[in-house]
Image: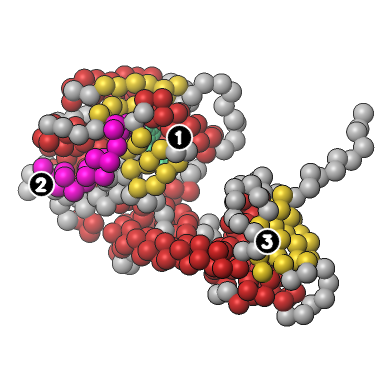
Amino acid sequence: MSAADGDPSLRGPRGARAEPVGDDELEGLFAPFLGHPGVLIAVSGGPDSTALAVLAARWRRARGEGPMLGLVTVDHGLRPGSAREAEAVRALADAIGLSHRTLHWRGAKPTTGVQEAARAARYRLLTAEAKARGSGAIALGHTLDDQAETVLFRLSRGSGLSGLAAMRPASRRDGVALLRPLLGLPKARLIATLRAAGVPFVEDPSNGDTRYARARLRVLAPLLADEGLSAARLALFARRMARADEALERATDQAGARIGLAPWQAGAPVRLDLAGFGELPKEIGLRLLARAIDQNGREGPAELAKLEAMLEQIYARLKGEPSPFRRTLAGALVAIRRGELCVSPAPERRKGPASR
Ligand SMILES: Nc1ncnc2c1ncn2[C@@H]1O[C@H](COP(=O)(O)OP(=O)(O)OP(=O)(O)O)[C@@H](O)[C@H]1O
């Protein structure tokens, strides 16, 4: 048995030895890059995004042509070592022949919810940089293990079907494509790839910090895998949810066009035929209501449980409960009048008398 055989980070599910990613896999992984003039590779210096950079550079070199690739690191300025980590990514970029830029999260940092704020700032900085360069796409190093963790995290938070579809291999944010070429690969294979190539990487210390729910779920992962809830199975579950979600979204488009009494326009009130709404399958009605509220509210997406409760109240009116219906949710006003379900921006809340 070699030393590596005993290294748990090199083992895949149920102790199977993880193989480095082979050159014959690269085209399949990176073909989605081809639709873009340039791709910014978001590299924290951790194993996943380091492997992403190494593999993408290998792919690009082998084909001799393709999109411009460049590495970008966001220095959140939250840990003393963060500038050094960004410098290590620059050294990696030099070694693999790609450019590198560090983006800084400046300004005041919140004392609570700092991880969420850092994540939002990171995406803001990355999408702005991609737009400024005309790159069109950002590549992220999420793996199969991250996908599994996202499914478990969302299950634990009561997400519905769309949330359980978890991360998509390709999505959009602020007009920029987000690509996740490694979403089908276990982290153990990426670590094996870096070890085989002799490329160093760092581990984010917050990854093992059990004050965070994701780190606690990571601790549970081997136990769940023993019960059949392996990362691969959870990721397969997410793909099936994504397939169902796409079908339901399309059915929702069609239902909206069919029972809409006014054209669906960004920022415009939504008017739906109430009887037609009542005949829709519940899931489609729920999605239409959510869209109408998203479009008219100012407070972001409404919570699923609140939407479900409102849907039941609308059904009660449809069954003949006579009381008037006028409710606000997530900054939108939902009202029933003269056979119509109307969703419009909620009036500004009146402020009480000024206090001294
Ligand atoms: N500081 C950083 N600089 C550049 N890219 C980063 C940085 N941190 C994370 N990323 C990118 O985001 C990917 C996911 O990182 P990580 O899992 O730590 O973030 P997350 O917050 O859990 O992910 P998400 O932002 O999708 O929720 C990394 O593989 C990398 O591509």
Q: Is mark 1 within 8 Å of ligand 1?
A: yes
Q: Is mark 3 within 8 Å of ligand 1?
A: no
Q: Front-most of 350 and 216?
A: 350
Q: Which residue is mark 3?
A: 271
**Where does residue 51 sit, x and y in percent of width and height?**
23, 37
Query: Does 146 appear in magenta?
Result: no
The residue at the point 75 percent across, 50 percent down is 346
Query: Does 37 appear in magenta?
Result: yes
Disc 2 packing (10 Å; few <14; some 14–19; many ≥20): few
Is residue 101 visible from the viewing direction of this image? yes
Disc 1 packing (10 Å; few <14; some 14–19; many ≥20): some
The residue at the point 15 percent across, 52 percent down is 17
The residue at the point 86 percent across, 40 percent down is 351
The kind of secondary structure element at disc 2 is helix
* Ligand 1 quarter of the rendering: top left
The kind of secondary structure element at disc 1 is helix
> Any mark on residue 24, and which?
2
Three-letter code for the amino acid on which mark 2 is drawn: Asp
Give the mark, 2 or 1, whose residue is nearer the N terminus.
2
The quarter of the picture where residue 39 lies is top left
Q: Which residue is mark 1?
A: 123
**Where does residue 196 sit, x and y in percent of width and height?**
12, 37
Three-letter code for the amino acid on which mark 1 is drawn: Tyr
Q: Give the answer, above or below, for where 269 lies relative to 95.
A: below
**Where does residue 200 sit, x and y in percent of width and height?**
22, 29
The quarter of the picture where residue 67 lies is top left
* Distance from the alpha carbon under mark 2 to that under mark 1: 31 Å
Give the mark, 3 or 1, whose residue is nearer the N terminus.
1
Q: Is residue 260 left or right of residue 157?
A: right
Q: Give the answer, above or below, for where 159 lies relative to 356.
A: below
The residue range painted magenta reads: 22-47
